[in-house]
Amino acid sequence: MTETGSSEIIKKLDAESIKELWSKTYNTVGKPDWSHILPYYDENIYFRDTIQEIHGFEDFKAMTERLTKRSKDLKMNVVRVLMHKETVFLEWEMTISFKRNPSSVMYGASRLTFNDAGKIIEQRDYYDLWGDIFDNIPRFGKMYRRFMKRKFG
């Protein structure tokens, strides 16, 4: 992509367009689809979440493909988007159905950092994977929360 094309990307990605794009990613019929947002990621993307740390576009793309294969259904409600200069925060609620387990809602946030070319150079996702999943298991969720409160609260 040319410098002009990169500048156009950053102009297009205001808070509202980011909310629209990320909502579209997860609210397709059943499986998530990242094809429309992958062009906004830099070749040297650094991604980190509760589970993994990824360097580079090809590994990032492979991670999105693994999530698509594992998920029976995935939906995301983008609650709010805050943008300041080259940094964007998204607050979200994700409902994920795995192949053999009931649906779980995970509450989280993502921080996106854009480089000078207008591409996402870093993404950091924050969420409580186990707590949000365990909350959906009868009796176990309450035990887990008591344990966490006793040990860390």
Image (cartoon, rainbow, N blue to C red):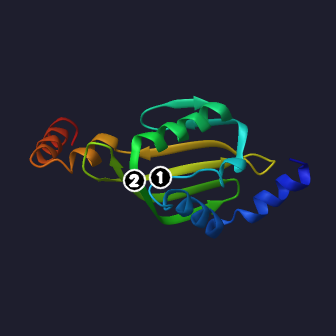
**Distance from the alpha carbon under mark 1 to that under mark 2:** 6 Å
Point 68% across, 66% down: residue? 14
Q: Which mark is residue 91?
A: none
Residue highlighted by disc 2: 73
Q: Which mark is residue 31?
A: 1
On the image, the x and y values in percent for residue 69 come to: 46, 40
- Which residue reaches farthest left? 139
Drawn side of residue 81 relative to residue 144, left or right = right
Identity of the residue drawn at 22% across and 44% down:
134
Tell me how many marks there are: 2
Image position of 152 (left or right of 66): left
User: Where residue 107 appears, x then y in whole percent?
Assistant: 37, 54
Q: Residues within 10 Å of mark 2 (few under 14, many from 20)?
A: many
User: Disc 2 marks which amino acid?
Assistant: Asp
* Quarter location, residue 140: top left
Left or right: 7 as drawn, with respect to 107: right
The quadrant in which residue 17 appears is: bottom right
Please say if the residues under marks 1 and 2 sit with CB atoms less than 8 Å apart.
yes
Q: Amino acid at mark 1?
A: Lys
